[in-house]
Image (cartoon, rainbow, N blue to C red):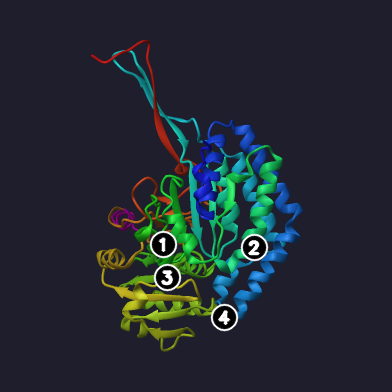
Amino acid sequence: MTTLSPYDSMSPVNQTAYRAKEAAAILAPLPRAAKDDALLAIADALEVRASEIVEANAQDVARAREAGIGEGMIDRLTLTPERVRAIASDVRDVAALPDPVGEVVRGSTLPNGIDLRQVRVPLGVVGIIYEGRPNVTVDAAALCLKSGNAVLLRGSSSAYRSNTALVRVLRDAVHGAGLPADAVQLVPGEGRDSVRELMRARGLVDVLIPRGGASLINTVVQESVVPVIETGTGNCHVYVDADADLDTAVEILVNSKAQRVGVCNAAETLLVHRDIAPAFLPRALDALAAAGVTVHADERVMAYAEDSKATVVEATTEDWETEYLSHDIAAAVVDSLDRAVEHIRLWTSGHTEAIVTTSQQAARRFTQLVDSTTVAVNASTRFTDGGQFGFGAEIGISTQKLHARGPMGLPELTSTKYIVTGDGHVRR
């Protein structure tokens, strides 16, 4: 009697996950050199085949413009030859990072003579569900390969041509380096059914990581039976304290909001202590106007807008919870640092909050009371980033508290196992 493999009765999505699981078993014990060789081959291939990638991306960008997608999202979608070279450079940076697999997290010799070690091991098969940022395709693949994981990539339909071209390049490079091409796969299908099926592939997929807007993330968190690492939205706050230096505060505010608006670590809300508001807000509103930012203001901020060059509209409750990803910011005057913290606790997505102050006491209290992945003191919210933190390209920024929190680099793509070594030991 012929025994059929379970593969034969699987759907295309599950077949893809099954192949990834087999590839993950091959990747897990590989030495660092083998993985680094594959990463360097990927970097070279990206540069050699950049025109192929950019041509495919141009089709996605054209479709997005026809659909009326905002410029912030268009910017996230767009690949240029320069951006492809930068992505290749990021891959080389990942290759240069230490390999987390095999690292001894802790170890000791127990009183009975048994040697106990807790070591890092790959997660296995990592599924990434993400929106229109094709650079994520390469970042995720590079980090997963370096940490010994196979990766299943499910980007949005808006970047389908870009992602298809990128994965083709990645797979060719991985295969050419002697690793299984199925270590990097694009999940088949453009519709929601393939996403739902991926979320139900428990036993084939070890973890899912959603990257994108609140709707996508909430759907994956609520509907997935596969374990999820939640990468949250970025409703980030900048609080200007009573003791802030005005020049520093203006510079940090504008950089946090306008340096690049379509990213999760851009500031979306400005909170200003009432004592500094008369001196700060006129300058801040003019600086935001010069950066093309529209201010969604409460009544107290409105009072300073009459002589300003800024475009100011009345804020609604919805503004305090909005991740704009555009040239917009909500703004309010608060009576104290504690009121600022209360506002943040009520509306934050738990990503990044910044305080601008010359008071060590205020900085200390703010960092103690604010519970987000990152709390910045006299620094832009834009620094919450794996590359800026020295982790290399990140897989995402986790806003949950279990397993990983904040920018997720290589160690966060591993789990651990215990190795118990005895000499004929038995438990009595």
What whole-number distance in Å separates the C-alpha atoms at marks 1 and 2?
22 Å
Q: Which residue is mark 4?
A: 68
- Marks 2/3 in contact by CB < 8 Å: the verdict is no
Q: Nearer the viewer, residue 421 or 270?
A: 421
Q: Is residue 332 above or below residue 409?
A: below
Q: Amino acid at mark 4?
A: Gly
Count residues near mark 1 (Cα–Cα under 10 Å), then give few for <14, some for 14-19, many for 20+. many
Question: Can you tell which mark lies on residue 217?
Answer: 1
Which of the two labelled residues, at mark 2 and mark 3, occupies the earlier sequence position?
Answer: 2
Q: Which residue is mark 2?
A: 162
Res 235 → quadrant: bottom left
**Magenta-drawn segment:** 358-367
Q: Is residue 379 above or below residue 295?
A: above
Res 223 → quadrant: bottom left
Q: Is residue 322 above or below residue 81?
A: below
Under tag 4, what secondary structure?
A: loop
